[in-house]
Image (cartoon, rainbow, N blue to C red):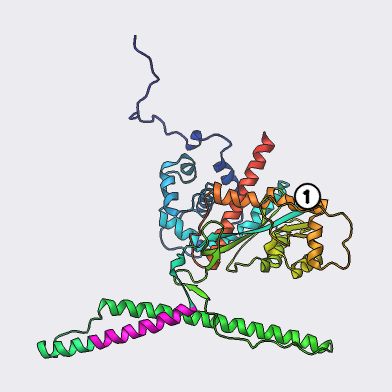
Amino acid sequence: MSKTYRPWNPDQAWLLPPSPRAWLPEGDLVYFMLDVVKEMDLSAITCRYEQEDRGYPPYHPRLMTTLLLYAYCMGVYSSRRIQKLCERDAAYRVLVGDDVPNFRTISDFRKDHLAALQSLFVQVLRLCGEAGLLKVGVVSLDGSKVKANASRHKAMSYAYMEKEEERLQKEIAEWLAKAQSTDATEDELYGRETRGDELPDELARRQSRLAKIQEAKRALEEQALAAAAAEAARRAAEDDAARAAGKNPRARQPIDPTPAPKAQRNFTDPESKIMKTSNKGFDQCGNAQIIVNEEQIILAAEVTDQANDKQQVKPMVAQAQENLTGAGVEPKIGALDADSGYYSEDNVTYLEGESIDPYLATERLKHNEKLACAPDGPAPEAMTPKEKMARKLRTKKGRETYAKRKGMVEPVFGQIKQARGFRQFLLRGLAKMRGEWSLICLTHNLQKLFRSRQLAVA
């Protein structure tokens, strides 16, 4: 007797078309995304379409927004991959039905509405606040270098630009002399009426490269002049303050308005910078910053071209407070912890002025290195501000507060980079990198909101 199997006929047609929703469980993320985007204010996107009546009807902005946000939640960032999944994946088919957008349409929608999509960050924070996920007793600030869409081999220092410019100009002169000599020889052979004005490929490539190098040099020189002007203004303000206090302005070295020899500029994405990374040494990157609370909700997100984190405390705290206000939550941050890259006396003074208790590490410890505990209570007056902060972190409260970083901000970067695979920006230019990072962060918050609702139902 032969074995009986379940019926299987892949060529069997459906007698009645099934609903795509029947292919997914009720609690799937895609249904949550449909419900959330339905409540969002997308007027900043729809107004651009409502001003134009000509042409073929576009895809609905809510469809495209939901598709992009769902794809980012699932760690899919390529428009080509999104189109392929819309053709093959049941969840994406629930979103788009039979009308699959082309990858170019998806890419153009993201590019054209990046600023409007970025503004959804606060709307998502408001939803998190309604779910009780915006407690801001202690927050944590951290940054991570994310590779830019540019190769570090396409960057060149100012000193090397000068050397390369000189070499190319010499080679171009040699090629021009060679071309003139060749023209004269050919004139004798073929006559002056024969055409011979085409640029040799070698000469065209060198002229194009020389033009790019000269453009990059001008940009670095303009940046150096702007920095010199800003430094001159800062010195003048310090000197005026000193004179007002009855003191003599201190002597300083003259300001050099020329670029530093090691100042670099990338030809592919000039707004990205060479930065030290944890795994590849130096690479072309953007410095991605976040502030998170104990529920791992991202309260503020930014991308800067500065490798040093010390300048990021003030703008990140200000953005977090602004975002919390926009989300309808009192922006009362109780304490902030950050690693040694953020420590400076100015940052401590600023946080205390904002009534935020600072816990900023003053030095990097070796792996498994432990410091002796410090007694609770006020620090001795003879200590410097840095010594006071180091002592504060060694108290029982300081240890407990700073240890929260391991469960707050550090796992968020792990979830974004490892679980969702976001390790490189797709878009070029600082403004676009900021928009892309905002999309990453707001979809992280959406995932946290989705899981909190799942737990509530369970």
Q: Circle 1 sits on which residue?
A: 400
The reply, left or right, for residue 176 in relation to residue 136 is left
- Total count of labels: 1
Q: Position of residue 176 (x, y in %)?
A: 27, 86
Q: Is residue 279 visible?
A: yes
Residue in front for this viewpoint, 83 or 47: 83
On whether residue 176 falls in the magenta region, the answer is: yes
What's the magenta bit mostly, secondary-structure-wise? helix
Task: Describe the element under mark 1 as helix, strand or loop.
Answer: helix
Q: Is residue 181 above or below residue 319?
A: below
The reply, left or right, for residue 126 in relation to residue 144 is right
Amino acid found under the numbered disc labelled 1:
Glu
Region of the chain picked out in magenta, as a range: 158-178
The residue located at (73%, 68%) in the rendering is 344
The reply, left or right, for residue 117 in relation to residue 392 is left
**Quarter of the picture holding the C terminus:** top right
Say few, some or many: other residues with alpha carbon within 10 Å of mark 1 (under 14 / 14 to 19 / 20 or more): few
Q: Quadrant of residue 224?
A: bottom right
**Quarter of the picture holding the N terminus:** top left
Q: Is residue 94 above or below residue 396?
A: above
Q: Position of residue 168 (x, y in %)?
A: 36, 81
Residue in front for this viewpoint, 249 or 37: 249
Residue in front for this viewpoint, 417 or 332: 417
Q: Is residue 37 visible?
A: no
Q: Quadrant of residue 120?
A: bottom right
Residue in front for this viewpoint, 24 or 361: 361
Q: Position of residue 271 (x, y in %)?
A: 52, 70
Q: Position of residue 384 (x, y in %)?
A: 82, 68
The residue located at (47%, 64%) in the rendering is 52
The residue located at (79%, 86%) in the rendering is 242
Q: Is residue 30 above or below residue 218?
A: above
